[in-house]
Structures are given as C-alpha cells and as structure tokens.
Amino acid sequence: MIAAGLIFTIGFLLGEDRGKLSHEAIRIKNLTLLATIVWTVSSAGGAIIEVANLLGGSFLNAFDSSTIFTFMLSTSIGRDFAFQIIIGIGTWALIARSRKVGAIYFALALTMLALLVPLFQSHASSAGNHGLAIGSLIFHVGAVSLWVGGIIGLLVISPLERAASISRFSVLALWAAIIVGISGIANAWTRLNFWAGWQSRYGLLVIIKAALFLILVAIGAKHRRHIAAKIEGSQQVFRLLANESVVMIAAVAIGGWLSTTLPPISAAGIKGASDPSIGITGISMPKAPTFWRVLTAYSPDGTILGFLLLITALYIYGVVTLTRRGDKWPVGRTTAFAVAVGLVDFATSGGIGVYAHFAFSYHMLAHMILGMIAPIGFVLAAPVTLALRTLPQGRTSQERGIRGTFITVIHSRYSVIITNPVIALGLFDGSLFLLYMTPLFGKLMYSHSGHILMNMHFLLAGYLFFYVIVGIDPNPRKIPHIVRIIVLFAAMSIHAFFSIALLSTTTLTDGGYFASLNRPWNTNLLADQHVGASLGWMMGEIPILIALIATFIQWMRDDSREAKRIDRAADRAAAMGEEDELAKYNKYLSTLARGDLEHPD
C-alpha cells in the first residue's frame, strides 16, 4: 500500500515537465524503489511462512525450492504469493528505468492489480451475494489504498510541493471517501444477517470502522475548508495530515482485523450449504426461465456494477462541468450512454446475467449484448471527446497534466497499433474461436474472476471495434471508408462462420461446467448450446449491418462536407479575382497537352 501511494504521488500529485519526472519526483522514486523491495521480500517471506505452517515444521524446514515451487503452482494461496512476487519485481524494474510519467502510470496499474487480485480468495468469496461481496471489496480496498497512499505521499514530499499538491489530492480524497463509504456498506450488507449479525464481534468491528470513517470524512471536510486560507501554513497542514494519518491507520488496522475474522453465517450462507450451485456460481439456482423471471431477476455483480457506477459518475461530472461552463452537450450522446450502461447491467447483474451462469444460450445472449450492442451506445456517447473537453490542464505551461497525458496516450504508438482495423477485427472476432473452441471457456466459467475477465473482454473488444469503424471520437488513424466497409463484411463473414461451426458441434465446449450445476430445467445441454449459437448468429449480424449503414452515411456526409469546402474555396478565389482549384488543374492539363503537340515523339 505504501508503494502504491508513493507511485500515485509521483504520477498525480507532483509536477512534471512535458511528461518528464521532476527532481522531487526522482527523489520520491528512490523511496518507492525501497518500498517495492520491502513489498517483494515480505511477499516471499509470507510464502515461506505459509509453507512452514502447512508442513507443520520450523521456518528453516520450509526453505526447500521444490516444496515452495509446488506450493506456488498447486494452491490458490501460493499462486497469489507468486503473483505478488512477480509483480513486485516487474514494478521495481519498471520504476528503476522510468524517466517519464507514463511509466509511472503503468507501474501504478501493476501495483493496484497486485493488491486487488488476491481479494478473489478472501472470505467474501464464500459469502452470500458472492458477486456483490467480491466487487465491493475490490473497490473498497482500491479506494482505501489510493486514499492512504495519497496521505503518505503528501507527508514525505517537500513542503513546497505539498502546498501545490494538496488541493489536487483533496479532490481525489472526496471521490475515494464516496467509494469507500458505498462499498463498505454494500460489503457489510452481504455478510451480516441484520440484528443477529450486528451483535456479533464482526458486526462490532464494522460499527467501529464506520465511526472511524465518519471521523475521516469530517477531517477531510475541515481539510478542504482550510486549504485556500492556510495554504502557506505548511506546519499546520502537516499537523492536519498527521492527524488524518493516525485515524486512517486505525481504520486500516480494523479492516485487517475484519479480513481475518469470519463473518456470522447469514441466511444465504446456510442456503449455500444445501445448494451446490452457490458454491460453483455464487448464485442460487433460479427457477426455469420465463419472460417475467428474466426481466425481474437481479443478482448484482459488484465488480461490473461498481465499474458502471464509476464511469457514470465521471460522465455526469463531465456533462455538469460543461453545463456550468456554458457549453452544451448533445442529449443524444447522454441518452446513448445511459442505454449502454443499462444494457451492460442487464447482461451482467440483471436477468440475462443471472441465467448466463446456468445456461449457454443465456450466456451467448449476454455475450452479444456486451460485445455487439452496448459498445455501439458507448461509442455514440463520445466519452473521449467529453474527457478532452473537461479533464484538468496542467498547473503550469510546462506540465501536461491529466488532459495532456490523455492526449499523449491517444496518439501513442500503442493506440496507433490497436486501432489498426485488422487488429481490432482480430480482437473482436478472432477471440471467439480462442475462447469457445478451446478448453479456455470451461476454465473461465468455473471462477468469478473468469466471468469478469470474459465480460470485460467482450465489452472492451466490442468498443474498440466500433470505435475504429463508426467512432465519432478522435482517432489516431485516418481510416478510409472503403476499408471500414471491407472490415465490416469480413467481421460479418467470420462471425457467421463461427456460429455455423458452433452449430455443428457434437460435444459440449464448456468443459463440464453446465453439467456440474445439475439444473432441473432445459436439461438437453447440447441443444441449448446450439440455441446459443443460433442466437449469436442472429444478434451478431444485425449490429454489424447497422454499423455498415452508418458507415455509408458517414461516407456520404464526408463527401458532402468536402464538396462544400471546395465550393467555399472557389467562391473565395473568385471574390479575390483568383482562379479556383479546378480552373488551375484544367489549365495545368492544357499546358501538358500543348507540350505534347509541340514536342511529339
């Protein structure tokens, strides 16, 4: 957490010079390298201690390379330790070689990944409301890490940099406080069985942590009120940060105690003992699907739901910022965004998402919504344009700031590569064969993280494809319309071929996942798989056809704009007594013709 905080401080709180790290950032970078080494060594030590506990021997007996290697490959806890060590080494190497802020952003992403991935093995993974418990815990820990890390960073940087950075951190602290509060309430709700749960030791710890959270929010509010008036009083600001750190450490310590304390058995947990589908999917086996049941069923996937809430809050914030500035944002774009968010929620937490855990046909429905329909709404919402118009500028003329960094990412070599139509098509359609025609699909279906990975891949691959083809946001590539049409026809053909191949299968592609659920309805699994293939074919072709029509419309509009531009240029030339471009070109051709007549071969 300390390493994450220091990396965050370098990337977002300290100043930079056109993307290059400042002298103060380099000083903090050296502290970060030390924190990263401590993190990696402590992870290795934790793995050895865990091996010693499993063997029931001394700490020295655990120093056996083959035993440690087997532990890290064969157990989930061991794989988490291995992941932490690998990410720690990679982060250290990345930070050591970094000279620009971009590498720091990537290092922060790796560090947050190392913090959040092990949470899938926490107590929440066996609690009731499995998806909500895991998702809320991920956002809770992520927000706390940035919040705590930002305070630590402000404490170690120089007073001059602290005065310049404290207002920027204050904005982050507000967002972090909101996320921590909402995710904490959601997580407690999944674990406690109302009065019986609140009277347990676990419930008492939740109440204490909630009280500390309110104290932190009060300190943060005081902090924000006094920023403008006390910005020169570095000693007072330091004292306020120190007090906030003490309360924050106490809250984190209680959070750690909570993570090692088993929650009281809830009604969902009791039901899970007699319902094996909860142990596999985290959801109780639903009744046979009907239109009303699919329409009204809801089991929140906390990770995807939290992601949707976050991007919705950011989008609304951007629209409100433009409105306060006196600018207008098209209502149609906001509507497209809202529809896309609703579709994603319905396909992951709503009825489609619920039944997607139990039947391949509904899984394919969710896939088509996430990969084919919802991305079009997000593309039409123009989130990149909104971000470019509302992201904050750098604090000085030399600092790129978040907006400048975002522009750099858009025009980076990586963006140019992934926006290549062939690569976008490969991620969009090629991944279908990699997922469903290999054992990968069955392995991913057995884990909650696998579900999240699939859903996010469907959504992001679909967004990238339609962004390249019909996107209205700035694109680092200028793709001719004829190329877009060819790519769309290729996508339609590949998708049809995949659907036919899936329709022709005589064996199940899920690795035994759906059979292990023993669902009492729709028991012909192969027939259900063929239904899913048919739905995928039907729902996949229609969005591509719509994109094809939209591309034709964009082509005609671009030609019309170009014709109007040429006419305006001709009018300006005529008004100034000059020849227009067409006249100049015709004169050039006449000159060539006269030259051919005067000098025949």
Image (spheres, rainbow, N blue to C red):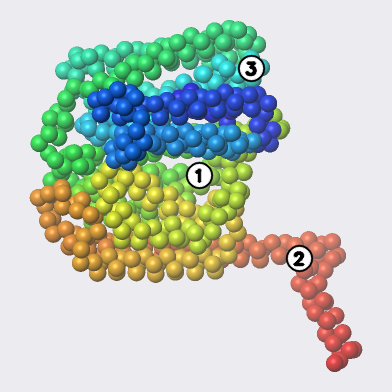
Check disc 2 and report the residue beneath it: 570
**Is residue 143 in sight in this rendering?**
no
Q: Is residue 147 left or right of residue 393?
A: left
- Does 296 appear above or below 108? below
State which mark lies toward you, 2 or 1. 1
- Does 422 appear above or below 66? below
Position of the C terminus, as image quadrant, is: bottom right
Q: Secondary structure at mark 3?
A: loop
Q: Secondary structure at mark 1?
A: helix
Q: Is residue 191 left or right of residue 418?
A: left
Position of the N terminus, as image quadrant, is: top left
- Counting from the top left corner in percent of width and height, residue 275 is at 12, 39
Q: What's the amino acid at mark 2?
A: Ala
Q: CA distance from mark 2 to mark 3?
A: 61 Å
Q: Residues within 10 Å of mark 2 (few under 14, many from 20)?
A: some
Instruction: Write down the quadrant of residue 86 in the picture.
Output: top left
Residue at image point 31% right, 39% down: 70
Q: How many marks?
A: 3
Check disc 1 and report the residue beneath it: 383
Q: What's the amino acid at mark 3?
A: Ser
Residue at image point 45% right, 29% down: 40
Q: Residues within 10 Å of mark 3 (few under 14, many from 20)?
A: few
Q: Is residue 183 left or right of residue 322?
A: left
Residue at image point 52% right, 54% down: 418
Which labelled disc corresponds to residue 158?
A: 3
Q: Is residue 522 left or right of residue 486?
A: left
Which of pointers 2 and 3 lies earlier in the amino acid sequence?
A: 3
Q: What's the amino acid at mark 1?
A: Pro
- Counting from the top left corner in percent of width and height, residue 350 is at 26, 43
Instruction: Write down the quadrant of residue 141 in the picture.
Output: top left
